């Protein structure tokens, strides 16, 4: 099945087209704003779910280059890209009655008419205006047709087209009565795909300009089979390490987790296949990372089961109690992350939406496989009584099990971390984080970020030859010219063309002349040199920041409702602590920041939220065991207990994710090395912040509340049904 998944430009190559941007109306000026709007409109058309991974770049003052992966029908791709999508409703005399501004944006959808034929349903802004239009058309009987045009041009005419077998207009329904409705159906000889494409075009909106195709060509893979092989190998090593860890630490339940994780991987690939998603190298890395994240729900459940076994419960009772107590933590952490992903998808663009889509799918599938799949499989063995006298099969030593008659609660169990007082030393960690953040701001202001061509100005060099070219030969040429390339892509079926992207613009005419002269003398053809604008990359970065801020507000609101607002604030502080630390780290180390870095930051943000919520869930449990808090010492003990009880889970979870990230960094392709390094740094800081920052900030806020009111009466926090469907 994996062979049927669409591979991205970096792995399989695709189709490239270069457009010259021309005014759509007389007197229209083509400036940077018009180019940016056009690039954004093209991205919306191609990337509805964010899983198509198009590459769109603005070049010079009036050109836009679009690269698409895995295009089978180039003519269909051209139509989707260059159609202006100006919809008009006209009478038989070609007079405009309504246009695209009368439609509700984003509400076009593919449907079926009364005869079962594909059509497109539009939603109008005004019933009254449509009623007035149909009244005027009705008065023109017998020529009472409402003609729907797409991209009506000067010289077009309904009377010329109506007799043709394939007219230019979309449809011409007769109006036999005044219609007071806000919906219009566009019918025609559409296939389902054609109707769906038309709906997508209308939802994406009309292009603000005209696009004139200069040339198009096929594009070779920039990384190729070797990079794909390396990344898949790294993924296999990372997943195998997770499987060995789960079996070694959790024994039989770990074996069950390996089965459900395998199902999870299969389902992820299946959904990617059904969605027609395009998989790039960072996408493969994200999927492998998803395996590490999916194991978290298993770890939470198994840690709870081990606690229940240690207090002396039977295997069957411990299994039920562990599932019951872990459900809320898993539910809250997953729902909080999904909330952030939905906001990222709704307000984000391009690969931000792709990241959000993948995150939502991963969380839903991990919840399905880990919460229900693992429980069902393990429940079969537990209920068969095969494990009745085998608590050691759960990784619990016989010496650690208390007698049930001792009546010990799971909250009173000793942990490996009881020797350390996390709250007492909070100021040390606050100081460490403050010094690192302030130092990071200073260093960031001095060194800035080492931005790739995705976010800074660059130069595109196209080299042509009568003979086949190779990436190795081109790289030697660049070394000779003292140029460092962002990537080298071979084009054409015979590989007679190579496209090189270099960071920085050549304002120095002498350098441009040197490059031109070198390639002309060596290959007999003058290279094409053009500047590339980072317009799309900058929009992507701004979209990520804006979406992240909105997601933070959403998380605070949700956590305030489910927990309390202080926990929401503490979680967000930890989240931004992690994100900024990664940015400062990349500034200091001078590692290059590209589009995949944004994906890494967002991944760590998701992990940070998840980790903090699980810790706060346990703190909430400890808090709810009391009716009233009278002293700061009580809050101190509650926080310490919550951290100690979840620390094993936090360490084990980050270890599994680190296994995949380290495997990707060591064995994966060079192209995702920075991505992997960002994940490793972020995972470590994410675990650190949830334990030493988020929980401690909540302690400080709660202590202030106690000082203000003298005592805190505990109101039971809102929870989900604890008696969720039994296995």
Image: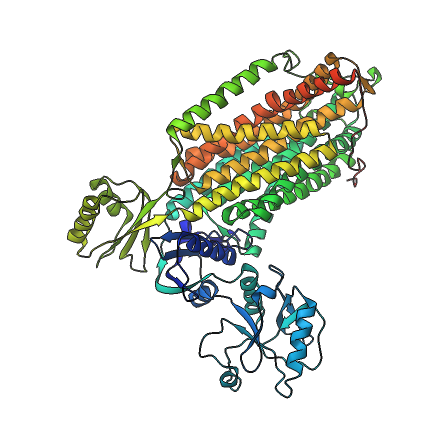
Q: Is residue 68 visible?
A: yes
Q: Is residue 436 left or right of residue 689?
A: left
The spot of residue 224 in percent (x, y) is: 37, 48
The spot of residue 660 in percent (x, y) is: 51, 34
Q: Is residue 244 left or right of residue 463?
A: right
Q: Is residue 391 visible?
A: no
Residue pictured at 39% horizontal, 40% vertical: 671
State the image quarter where residue 526 is shown: bottom left
Q: Is residue 175 above or below residue 724?
A: below
Q: Is residue 361 above or below residue 413?
A: below
Residue pictured at 29% horizontal, 44% vertical: 505
State the image quarter where residue 614 is shown: top right
Is 241 in front, or is 122? 122
The spot of residue 60 in percent (x, y) is: 33, 53
The spot of residue 710 in percent (x, y) is: 79, 15
Q: How is the image coloured?
A: rainbow
Q: Residue farthest to the bottom? A: 142
């Amino acid at each position: 099945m994996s062979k049927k998944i669409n591979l991205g430009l970096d792995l399989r190559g695709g189709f490239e087209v270069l457009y010259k941007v021309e005014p759509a109306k007389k007197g229209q000026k083509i400036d940077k704003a018009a180019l940016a709007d056009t690039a954004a409109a093209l991205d919306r058309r191609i990337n509805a779910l964010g899983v198509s991974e198009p590459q769109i770049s603005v070049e010079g003052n009036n050109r836009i280059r679009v690269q698409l992966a895995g295009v089978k029908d180039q003519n269909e791709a051209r139509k989707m890209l260059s159609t202006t999508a100006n919809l008009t409703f006209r009478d038989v005399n070609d007079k405009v009655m309504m246009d695209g501004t009368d439609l509700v944006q984003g509400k076009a959808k593919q449907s079926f008419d009364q005869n079962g034929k594909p059509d497109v349903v539009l939603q109008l802004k005004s019933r009254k205006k449509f009623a007035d239009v149909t009244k005027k058309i009705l008065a023109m009987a017998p020529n009472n047709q409402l003609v729907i045009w797409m991209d009506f041009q000067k010289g077009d005419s309904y009377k010329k087209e109506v007799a043709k077998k394939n007219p230019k207009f979309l449809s011409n329904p007769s109006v036999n009565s005044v219609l007071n409705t806000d919906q219009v159906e566009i019918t025609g000889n559409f296939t389902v795909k054609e109707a769906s494409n038309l709906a997508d075009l209308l939802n994406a909106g009309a292009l603000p300009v005209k696009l004139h195709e200069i040339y198009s060509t096929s594009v070779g893979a920039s990384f190729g089979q070797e990079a794909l092989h390396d990344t898949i190998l790294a993924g296999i090593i990372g997943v195998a390490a997770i499987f060995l860890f789960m079996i070694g630490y959790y024994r039989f339940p770990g074996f069950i987790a390996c089965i459900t994780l395998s199902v999870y991987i299969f389902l992820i690939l299946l959904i990617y296949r059904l969605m027609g998603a395009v998989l790039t190298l960072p996408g493969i890395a994200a999927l492998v990372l998803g395996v590490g994240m999916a194991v978290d729900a298993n770890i939470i459940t198994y840690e709870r089961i081990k606690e229940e076994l240690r207090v002396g419960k039977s295997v069957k009772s411990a299994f039920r109690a562990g599932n019951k107590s872990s459900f809320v933590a898993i539910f809250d952490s997953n729902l909080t992350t999904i909330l952030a992903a939905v906001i990222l998808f709704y307000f984000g663009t391009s690969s931000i939406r792709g990241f959000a889509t993948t995150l939502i799918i991963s969380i839903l599938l991990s919840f399905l496989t880990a919460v229900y799949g693992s429980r069902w499989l393990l429940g079969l063995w537990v209920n068969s009584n095969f494990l009745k006298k085998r608590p050691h099969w759960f990784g619990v030593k016989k010496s650690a099990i208390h007698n049930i008659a001792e009546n010990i609660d799971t909250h009173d169990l000793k942990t490996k971390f009881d020797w350390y007082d996390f709250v007492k030393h909070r100021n040390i960690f606050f100081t460490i984080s403050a010094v690192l953040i302030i130092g990071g701001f200073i260093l960031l202001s001095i060194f800035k970020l080492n931005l790739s061509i995705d976010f800074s100005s660059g130069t595109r060099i196209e080299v042509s030859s009568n003979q086949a070219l190779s990436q190795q030969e081109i790289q030697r040429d660049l070394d000779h010219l003292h140029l460092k390339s962002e990537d080298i892509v071979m084009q054409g079926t015979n590989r007679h063309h190579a496209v090189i992207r270099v960071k920085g613009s050549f304002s120095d005419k002498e350098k441009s002349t040197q490059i031109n002269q070198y390639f002309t003398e060596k290959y007999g053809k003058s290279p094409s040199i053009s500047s590339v604008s980072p317009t799309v990359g900058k929009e992507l970065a701004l979209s990520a920041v804006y979406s992240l801020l909105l997601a933070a507000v959403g998380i605070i609101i949700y956590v305030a409702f489910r927990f309390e607002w202080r926990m929401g604030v503490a979680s967000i502080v930890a989240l931004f602590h992690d994100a900024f630390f990664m940015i400062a780290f990349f500034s200091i180390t001078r590692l290059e920041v590209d589009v995949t870095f944004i994906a890494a930051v967002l991944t760590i943000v998701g992990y940070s939220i998840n980790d903090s919520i699980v810790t706060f869930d346990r703190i909430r449990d400890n808090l709810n065991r009391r009716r009233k808090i009278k002293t700061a010492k009580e809050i101190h003990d509650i926080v310490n207990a919550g951290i100690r009880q979840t620390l094993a889970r936090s360490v084990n979870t980050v270890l599994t994710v680190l296994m995949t990230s380290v495997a990707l960094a060591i064995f994966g392709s060079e192209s995702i090395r920075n991505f992997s390094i960002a994940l490793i740094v972020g995972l470590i800081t994410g675990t650190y912040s949830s334990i030493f920052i988020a929980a401690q900030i909540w302690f400080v806020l709660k202590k202030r509340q106690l000082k203000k009111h003298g005592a805190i009466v505990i109101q039971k926090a809102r929870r989900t049904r604890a008696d969720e469907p039994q296995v």
